[in-house]
């Protein structure tokens, strides 16, 4: 679609409600003409015009008009921003007047969508705009800003280029099927694939950190009844959210609580204690606990410090698929002497006295990725979609390596193609036709 055959769209760009200043944004081929009709003067690009904004003879408000000529604008189209007093009524009237003059209401996300379609932003960057707007703290905002600057996209693109070269190499080798792969640069190919595989693994780990920074860590508290799961949730939340009693089987429903630890956000979920038997309600509670663990990033396993082993056995199968576990030996106040924690994933605490909670906070903070972002490891925000695409890329490259080892070049080519496509989903740059042209245009071994 070109800039001349699209609609001109309009929307209030500032947050709903009253404010000192409000902004109405227009994008599309007619935006300048429409705005000039409201302002009653010609608009010069990148110039702040102080104007009266009128509907016919009547003044709606006075304010500023800013015109950005295509393609040097956020959307890549002609864009006008009208600043007026931030009254919802005034802003609605400006929008209505723009519509009378030929604009239409923008759909949610339509300005960003146009920026993507016009090549101003890739998909990951367009998503980063939304993440920046929604960022809950400085760390998340900084990470979103890095993603918006293309830090993530550039690394994805660099990897995509590596994969493209590997594909070209394999496709070319297929044409020389009667020669052995070793004479066709098989070693370079394997080395290149190993490099790409390790790059994907690094990127995947970083994207996972970025996702946690954006979504917060999803941590499920599990353990046998009466280990002190609800007490621990309350201690971490800093309020008596969950019911605590000395009756085993107190908690049945899931209880979600968002907790911020020094800027790191995590969702804690209290669950019913896991054990054999129980009445129908308790059994339903345990079923819900097991379900919740399916999507968890972290299982916080609460055990009674006086007898941790029996609890471990009770939860073993329920936590089998959770990527990370933290073992909490609770009720340390009941031990004859306080133990010293050596393994970072085992922490002795007392939900009752608060002993050990600082160490637990520190560990949770690290796991939620905030630590890494603080340390300036270049974290960017990422989404589950990106993590998923990278994981699929990794799996395809793994297949390709095995297929190369078996001299199954056609299959390896197919796996590399699938990996390349999965990667392209992140930035939205999957372009098969261009790819074919590239393959035939740029490579021929000795021909
Ligand atoms: N001494 C001591 N008692 C604790 C501690 N934490 C919890 N308790 C007690 O242990 C009992 C059970 O605590 P809960 O928090 O209800 O345990 P739970 O694991 O949520 O239990 P269910 O929901 O029944 O599975 C209560 O009487 C708590 O007061 C602790 O650190 N020290
Ligand atoms: K209890
Ligand atoms: Mg409980």
Image (cartoon, rainbow, N blue to C red):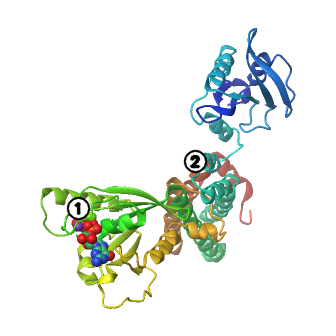
Q: Give the image quarter of residue 170.
A: bottom right
| Residue 303 appears in view | no
**In the depicted view, which residue is nearer to us: 327 or 229?**
229
**In the depicted view, which residue is nearer to us: 123 or 62?**
62
Please identify the quadrant where the N terminus is shown.
Answer: top right
In percent of the image, x 27 and y 64: which residue is there? 244
Q: Give the image quarter of residue 144.
A: bottom right
Using residue 400 as the reference point, say whether residue 98 is left or right of it: right
Q: For residue 66, which numbered disc appears in the image?
A: none
Ligand 1 sits in which quadrant? bottom left
Q: Give the image quarter of residue 279.
A: bottom left
355 is higher (above) or lower (below) than 115 = below
**In the depicted view, which residue is nearer to us: 427 or 361?**
361
Q: For residue 286, which numbered disc appears in the image?
A: 1
Q: Position of residue 425 (x, y in %)?
A: 57, 51
In percent of the image, x 64 and y 65: which residue is there? 166
In percent of the image, x 29 and y 83: which residue is there? 334
Q: Which residue is mark 2?
A: 134
Name the outermost residue toward the front.
Answer: 353
Q: Say how many tags the image has.
A: 2
């Amino acid at each position: 679609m070109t800039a001349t055959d699209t609609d001109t769209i309009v929307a209030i760009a500032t947050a709903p409600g009253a404010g000192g200043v409000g902004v109405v944004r227009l994008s599309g081929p007619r935006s300048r003409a429409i705005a000039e009709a409201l302002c009653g003067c010609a608009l010069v690009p990148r110039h702040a015009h102080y104007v009266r904004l009128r509907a016919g003879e009547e003044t709606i408000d006075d304010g500023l008009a800013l015109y950005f000529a295509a393609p040097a604008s956020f959307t890549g189209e002609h864009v006008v921003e009208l600043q007026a007093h931030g009254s919802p009524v005034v802003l609605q009237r400006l929008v209505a007047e723009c519509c009378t003059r030929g604009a239409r209401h923008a759909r949610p996300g339509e300005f960003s969508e146009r920026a993507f379609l016009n090549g101003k932003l890739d998909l990951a960057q367009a998503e980063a705009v939304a993440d920046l707007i929604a960022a809950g703290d400085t760390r998340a905002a900084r990470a979103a800003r890095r993603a918006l600057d293309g830090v993530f996209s550039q690394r994805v693109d660099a990897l995509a280029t590596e994969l493209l070269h590997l594909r070209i190499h394999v496709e070319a080798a297929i044409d020389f099927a009667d020669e052995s792969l070793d004479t066709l640069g098989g070693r370079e190919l394997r080395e290149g694939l190993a490099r790409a595989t390790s790059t994907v693994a690094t990127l995947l780990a970083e994207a996972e950190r970025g996702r946690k920074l954006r979504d917060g860590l999803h941590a499920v508290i599990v353990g046998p009844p009466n280990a002190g799961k609800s007490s621990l949730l309350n201690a971490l939340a800093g309020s008596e959210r969950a019911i605590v009693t000395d009756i085993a089987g107190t908690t049945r429903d899931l209880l979600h609580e968002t907790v911020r630890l020094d800027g790191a956000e995590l969702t804690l979920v209290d669950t019913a204690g896991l054990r054999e038997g129980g009445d129908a309600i308790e059994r339903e509670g345990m079923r819900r606990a097991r379900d919740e663990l399916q999507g968890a990033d972290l299982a916080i396993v609460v055990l009674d410090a006086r007898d941790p082993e029996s609890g471990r056995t009770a939860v073993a199968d329920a936590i089998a698929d959770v990527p990370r576990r933290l073992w909490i030996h609770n009720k340390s106040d009941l031990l004859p002497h306080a133990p010293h924690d050596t393994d970072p994933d085992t922490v002795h605490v007392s939900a009752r006295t608060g002993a050990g909670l600082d160490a637990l906070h520190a560990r949770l903070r690290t796991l939620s990725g905030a630590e890494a972002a603080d340390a300036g490891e270049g974290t960017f925000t990422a989404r589950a979609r990106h993590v998923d695409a990278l994981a699929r890329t990794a799996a395809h490259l793994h297949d390709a390596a095995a297929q190369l080892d078996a001299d199954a070049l056609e299959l390896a080519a197919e796996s590399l193609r699938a990996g390349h496509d999965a990667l392209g989903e992140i930035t939205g740059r999957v372009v098969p036709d261009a790819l074919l042209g590239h393959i035939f245009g740029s490579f021929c071994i000795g021909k």
